[in-house]
Image (spheres, helix red, strand yellow):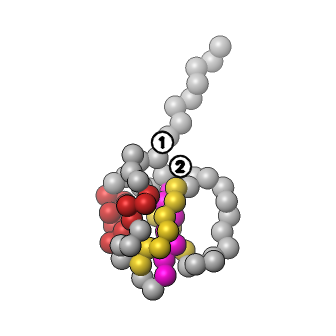
Amino acid sequence: MAPLPNFPTDPDDDPAAYVGLAAETAARQARERGWTDVRALAPGAVITLEYRVGRLNFEVDEGVVRRSWKG
């Protein structure tokens, strides 16, 4: 039997910790903590729902992160 591949994992970080931060500060901190892709989205933005390891999504309103989630 072939060995299982080593899939990448998300950083060990709580997305909820970014809520309430200024978007620029949150993005900088996320990259420092190992997130490879940080995406800022407007409230109600239409997005694709594919999951990408290492991506952190922010819903940003008036320059502040209102919601944050992986993938």
**Residues marked 1 and 2 touching at CB (< 8 Å):** yes
Q: Is residue 54 left or right of residue 45?
A: left
Asked if residue 2 is among those painted magenta in the image, a careful observer would answer no
Span colored in magenta: 55-61
Residue 7 in the image, given as x and y percentages of width and height: 53, 36
Quadrant of the rendered image containing residue 27: bottom left
Question: In which quadrant is the C terminus drawn?
Answer: bottom right
Residue 63 in the image, given as x and y percentages of width and height: 42, 82
Q: In whole angstroms, how far apart are the C-alphas of marks 1 and 2? A: 6 Å
Of helix, strand and loop, which mostly describes the magenta segment?
strand
**Residue 40 seen:** no
Quadrant of the rendered image containing residue 45: bottom right
Residue at the limit of the structure toward the top, as seen here: 1
Residue 18 in the image, given as x and y percentages of width and height: 39, 65
Which circle's residue, 1 or 2, is located before the other in the chain?
1
Task: Name the residue at 49% across, 82% down.
Answer: 61
56 or 43, which lies in front? 43
Question: In which quadrant is the N terminus drawn?
Answer: top right
Q: Which residue is mark 1?
A: 9
Q: Which residue is mark 2?
A: 53
Give residue 66's mark: none
62 or 3, which lies in front? 62
- Per the image, label 2 sits on a secondary structure element best described as loop
**Residue 65 seen:** yes
Q: Is residue 3 above or below residue 41?
A: above
Task: Name the residue at 58% across, 78% down.
Answer: 43
- Name which residue type carries label 1: Thr
- Per the image, label 1 sits on a secondary structure element best described as loop
Q: Is residue 38 left or right of residue 43?
A: left
- Name which residue type carries label 2: Val
